[in-house]
């Protein structure tokens, strides 16, 4: 190969490279996605747990929603007030004081209180137990299965199975909602941390059947509803439910409850 051929080859390769480079620059300008600087700044302040507790698909989704004004600056349950204040400064707004929320397990079926109908030998997972005939070892089909699905999904070490029933550590809970989503019996609810009393039972069985399955189950007597002066407690089927927003914490419902299933928090 002579010198002229080498020079020609280099020139052609260089020209092709230049043309491709120019095409890439043009394409980049034509198809580039505008990024909101506020969105980037908000995302940098979010904790990055991607727990979904905010109601958006991860921290990226929440950052985009806040930047567009579609979500409040205090929407992140994990970051709490400190993160809300930083995001408020980025957005140029005031951070409203949010009420801390925590998870609550509507069951008191401990190993002593809840009766067993057999022994469960399957996968140690509440969802797996719920999918088979019998639904686990406990007689109450509505109660906590005690196999710890909620424990496994909690990133904050805020929920543990104690004596056969899930118990929330309010000091660690950030109300991300993962435990709520994973519980097959829908026993876990996100409530205001200021709630004074809650009903620690979810059974829809009638009184006699409840007593046969668990010594501390709601028997549906409705005495608590008649005792409340603030319209804060009602029957949902055969179990009483307290409206935390209306409850003033007088404790009359708890005092009247014959099975002491209304618990002070």
Image: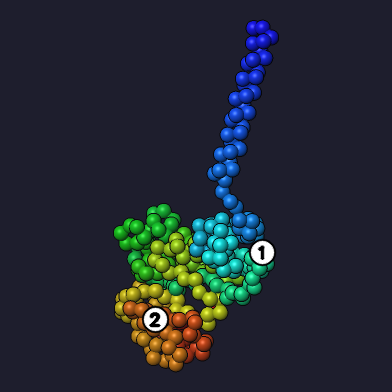
Comparing 19 with 77, the one in front is 19
State the residue at coordinates (55%, 43%): 30
What is the tally of numbered marks visible in this picture?
2
Q: Quadrant of residue 234?
A: bottom left
Comparing 9 with 46, the one in front is 9
Q: Position of residue 223 (x, y in %)?
A: 38, 89
State the residue at coordinates (50%, 57%): 57
248 above or below 130? below
Q: Check the picture and name the quadrant holding the C terminus.
A: bottom right
Residue 227 numbered tag: none
Q: Where is residue 139 in the image (x, y as percent from the top left)?
A: 35, 68
State the residue at coordinates (44%, 61%): 182
Q: SS at mark 2? A: strand
Q: Are marks 1 and 2 in contact (CB under 8 Å)?
A: no
**Which residue position is annotated with label 1?**
90
Closer to viewer: mark 1 or mark 2: 1
Q: Position of residue 36 (x, y in %)?
A: 61, 56
State the residue at coordinates (58%, 61%): 67
Q: How crowded is mark 1: few (under 14 residues within 10 Å), some or many (20 or more)?
A: some
Q: Residues within 10 Å of mark 2 (few under 14, many from 20)?
A: many
- In-image side of 134 versus 176 (left or right): left
**Which residue position is annotated with label 2?**
240
199 above or below 20? below
Q: Position of residue 146 (x, y in %)?
A: 45, 64
Please tell me which of labels 1 and 2 falls first in the chain.
Answer: 1
Q: Check the picture and name the quadrant holding the N terminus.
A: top right
Comparing 239 with 217, the one in front is 239
6 above or below 194? above
Q: SS at mark 1? A: helix
Comparing 50 with 30, the one in front is 30
148 above or below 20? below
Residue 163 can be seen in this image = no
């Amino acid at each position: 190969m002579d010198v002229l051929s080498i020079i020609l080859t280099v020139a052609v390769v260089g020209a092709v490279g230049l043309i491709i480079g120019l095409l890439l620059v043009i394409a980049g300008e034509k198809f580039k996605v505008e990024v909101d600087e506020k969105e980037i700044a908000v995302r940098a302040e979010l904790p990055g747990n991607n727990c979904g507790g905010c109601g958006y698909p991860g921290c990226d989704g929440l950052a985009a929603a806040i930047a567009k004004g579609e979500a409040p600056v205090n929407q992140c349950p994990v970051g709490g007030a400190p993160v809300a204040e930083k995001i408020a400064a980025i957005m140029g707004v005031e951070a409203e004081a949010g009420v801390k929320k925590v998870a609550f397990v509507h069951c008191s079926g401990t190993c002593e209180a809840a009766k067993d109908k057999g022994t469960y030998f399957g996968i140690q997972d509440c969802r797996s137990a719920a999918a088979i005939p019998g639904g686990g070892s406990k007689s109450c089909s509505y109660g906590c299965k005690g196999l710890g699905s909620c424990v496994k999904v909690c990133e904050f070490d805020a929920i543990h199975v104690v004596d056969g029933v899930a118990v929330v550590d309010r000091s660690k809970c950030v109300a991300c909602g993962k435990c709520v989503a994973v519980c097959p019996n829908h026993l876990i609810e996100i409530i205001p941390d200021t709630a004074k009393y809650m009903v620690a039972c979810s059974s829809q069985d009638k009184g006699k059947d409840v007593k046969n399955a668990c010594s501390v189950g709601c028997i549906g007597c409705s005495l608590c509803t008649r005792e409340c002066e603030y319209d804060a407690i009602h029957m949902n089927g055969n179990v009483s439910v307290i409206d935390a927003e209306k409850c003033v914490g007088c404790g009359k419902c708890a005092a009247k409850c014959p099975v002491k299933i209304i618990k002070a928090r």
